[in-house]
Amino acid sequence: MKAAVVVFPGSNCDRDLAVAFKAAGADVQMVWHKDTDLPAGIDIVGVPGGFSFGDYLRCGAIAANSPICGAVKAHADRGGYAMGICNGFQVLTETGILPGALLRNAGLKYVCKTVGLRVETSQSVYTEGYNAGDVIDIPIAHHDGNYFADDATLDRLDGDDRVVFRYIDNPNGSLRDIAGILSDNRRVLGMMPHPERAADAGHGGTDGQALFRALVDRVMIA
Amino acid sequence: MKATVHVMLKNGVLDPQGEAVRHALGALGFDGVNSVRQGKVIELDLADDATEDDVKAMCERLLANTVIESYRVDLG
C-alpha cells in the first residue's frame, strides 16, 4: 500500500503518522502543502495532526485552501482513501470532504490525555481489526475537538453507521460523544484522537495499531 | 474601499468563550448580563471596484465556516 502524508507549516504529527504507516507495512511519501498533485499510485492520503498555519482564522481553514488540498479532494471524490487525525480532521471538515465542524472545547481548555473510545462499527477498512463495542485507549491532544453538526447531519451519520468512534467520557463537548466519523462512501475517516500515538509498545499503549494494520492489509488486497 | 466582515457563531451553536466572558462579568459585579456571544471582526482594504458580492464570496470560501458561523458585510 502506498501512503502519502501531507505536511503543512505547523504540522507536528506528520512523522509520527508516517512511522505508523511504515510499521504496518506501507510505503510512505511526504507531500508538501504547495504541491498541486499527489504522487502517482497513492492509495491513501494521511492528513496529520498539528497546528497548520498556526490555527489562524479557524483551525484547518487556511490548510483546507492550500494547493495540495485540491488534490486531496479530487482523490477523495474519485473514491480514494484518506484519513485526517486531529488537525487533519479539522482540515477535512473545512474542505467539505467530511460533514460538520470542530468547535472550541466546551471546557475551553486544551485537553491532553489518554481517553477511552468505543469502536461503534467494524464496517470500514479502518476498523476491521476491531469488534464493534470494543473499548480502546487512545491519546487526545486538542483545544478544538468539539464536534458539531446540525441534527439532520447527526441523524444521517447515526443512521448510516458512519460514527466510528465515540468517547466513553466526553472530554470536549462533542455532540453525541462523537470522536470519529466516516464519509458517505466509508473511505474517508476523520478522528480527533491520535491512533498513531498508540501504535508502538514504546508509546505506552498499542490500541491504535490495529487501525493501521487493518488498513494496510485491506487496501493491499483491494 | 474598506469592508468590514463580522463573523459570529450561529444561534444554537454553543459559544463557550462567550459563556466564560459572561461568568467573568458576573464575578466583577456586573449583574443582569443575560448572555454573551463572542465573534470576530475582519477589516478588508479592497480595490475600488470591489463589490459586496466579491466580499460575500470571500466569506463563503474562507472567512466564515457557514456550517457553524454566520457573517455580515459592511461596506465603506
Image (cartoon, rainbow, N blue to C red):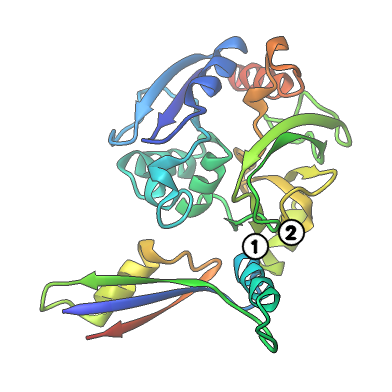
Q: Is A142 on the left-hand or right-hand side of A201?
A: left
Q: Chain of mark 2?
A: A
The reply to whether residue A162 is visible in this rendering is no
Name the residue located 31 percent from the left edge and 84 percent from the top edge.
B74
Q: Chain of mark 1?
A: A
**Residue A201 percent across, percent down from the top left:** 72, 10
SS at mark 1 in the image: loop
Name the residue located 42 percent from the left edge and 41 percent from the top edge.
A52
What is the quadrant of residue A16 in the picture? top right
**Residue A149 percent across, percent down from the top left:** 65, 62
Q: CA distance from mark 1 to mark 2?
A: 8 Å
Q: Are marks 1 and 2 on the same chain?
A: yes
| Residue bearing mark 2 | A175
Q: Quadrant of the N terminus of chain B?
A: bottom left
**Residue A97 percent across, percent down from the top left:** 51, 49
In this view, A108 is above or below B72: above
Residue A181, which numbered label? none
**Residue B28 percent across, percent down from the top left:** 65, 76
Name the residue located 60 percent from the left edge and 65 percent from the top edge.
B17
In this view, B70 is above or below B31: above
The reply to whether residue A128 is visible in this rendering is yes
Disc 2 packing (10 Å; few <14; some 14–19; many ≥20) = some
Marks 2 and 1: in contact by CB < 8 Å? Answer: yes
Q: Is A100 on the left-hand or right-hand side of A33?
A: right
SS at mark 2 in the image: helix
Q: Amino acid at mark 1?
A: Ala
Camera-side residue: A48 or A68?
Answer: A48
| Residue bearing mark 1 | A149
